């Protein structure tokens, strides 16, 4: 696949805050495509039909970023991120979007690739991350009610992962290595949620964002468009944009 430069200009101003909002408005449409793929992937996950539909939505909203990150580990490098169609977002642009989280994402991706997990193992681990048990407070806040089913599915996929990795000579070591990245992913997820809250949620009324992106990240679904012809961010006139 030929690598192509990303066609949009991330920098529209000397104001770093405006540039970051512009970058997010552009990137959100790329992220939205991956979210759609993740949603379709989840529809085919065995045993997940025992969980209520609304509860699956709760799990997706909580874990979609880490699922996305696991999907792109082989596409991330110090040069940036290669999208599915071969377009390339350079690493400086990723830093504009994600800030310091971009460095952590890269280090995580390089670690996962260096350990040598297979695509099949990562696919099951993506499901495993989706079905992590929730705290009682989180369940109460989101009205999650499929608690017992979630625990059963979590244990099922933990066993599936171990069995899948049992064909290698160092099964326990590889399994423990995979399990060790779970808290790392949850930490990265918390960092990403802070970006969504501080950058996107605080400025969502100024941004034109895809509907699914808004739904997944719990943003109001009414969209105010500030795109110009080049698909770039245009702040509303005479309005300050806090970040």
Image (cartoon, grey):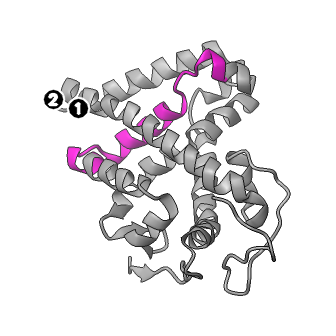
The residue that label 2 is drawn on is 170
Which residue is at a point 34% across and 35% down the rendered structure image? 181
In percent of width and height, residue 3 lies at: 39, 79
The answer to whether residue 144 is visible is no
The residue that label 1 is drawn on is 174
CB of mark 1 within 8 Å of CB of mark 2? yes
Q: Residue furthest right?
A: 222
Q: Which residues are magenta?
A: 112-138
Q: Is residue 162 above or below residue 60?
A: above
In percent of width and height, residue 57 lies at: 69, 36
Q: Is residue 173 above or below residue 108?
A: above
Q: Quadrant of residue 42?
A: top right
Q: Mark 2, residues whose alpha carbon is within 10 Å: few (<14), some, or many (≥20)?
A: few
Q: Is residue 59 above or below residue 93?
A: above
Q: Is 136 contained in the magenta span?
A: yes
Q: Residue furthest bottom?
A: 229
Which residue is at a point 72% across and 24% down the rendered structure image? 141
The reply, left or right, for residue 92 in relation to residue 18 is left
Image quadrant where one finds the C terminus: bottom right
| Of residues 57 and 166, the one drawn nearer to the viewer in this rendering | 57
Circle number at residue 217: none
| Of residues 12 and 116, the one drawn nearer to the viewer in this rendering | 12
| Magenta stretch: helix, strand or loop mostly | helix
The reply, left or right, for residue 206 in relation to residue 81 is right
Q: Mark 1, residues whose alpha carbon is within 10 Å: few (<14), some, or many (≥20)?
A: some
Which residue is at a point 44% across and 82% down the rendered structure image? 5
In percent of width and height, residue 121 lies at: 35, 39
Look at the numbered disc 1 and give the secondary structure of its residue.
helix
Q: Residue furthest top?
A: 148
In percent of width and height, residue 102 lies at: 41, 57
Q: Is residue 92 above or below residue 66?
A: below
């Amino acid at each position: 696949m030929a690598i192509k430069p990303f066609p949009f200009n991330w920098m529209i101003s000397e104001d770093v805050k405006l540039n970051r909002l512009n970058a997010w408005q552009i990137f959100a449409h790329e992220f939205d495509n991956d979210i759609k793929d993740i949603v379709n992937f989840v529809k085919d996950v065995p045993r997940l039909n025992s969980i209520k539909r609304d509860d699956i939505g709760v799990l997706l909203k909580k874990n979609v970023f880490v699922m996305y990150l696991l999907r792109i580990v082989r596409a991330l490098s110090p040069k940036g991120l290669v999208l599915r169609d071969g377009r390339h977002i350079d690493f400086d642009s990723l830093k504009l979007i994600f800030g310091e989280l971009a460095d952590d994402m890269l280090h995580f991706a390089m670690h996962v690739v260096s350990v040598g997990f297979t695509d099949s193992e990562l696919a099951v681990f993506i499901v495993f991350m989706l079905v992590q048990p929730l705290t009682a407070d989180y369940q109460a806040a989101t009205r999650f009610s499929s608690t017992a089913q979630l625990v059963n599915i979590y244990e099922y996929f933990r066993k599936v992962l171990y069995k899948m990795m049992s064909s290698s000579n160092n099964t326990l070591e590889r399994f423990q290595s995979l399990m060790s990245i779970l808290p790392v992913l949850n930490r990265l997820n918390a960092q990403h949620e802070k970006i969504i809250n501080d950058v996107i949620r605080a400025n969502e009324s100024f941004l034109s964002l895809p509907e699914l992106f808004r739904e997944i990240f719990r943003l109001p679904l009414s969209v105010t468009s500030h795109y110009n012809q080049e698909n770039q961010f245009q702040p509303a006139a005479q309005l300050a944009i806090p970040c």
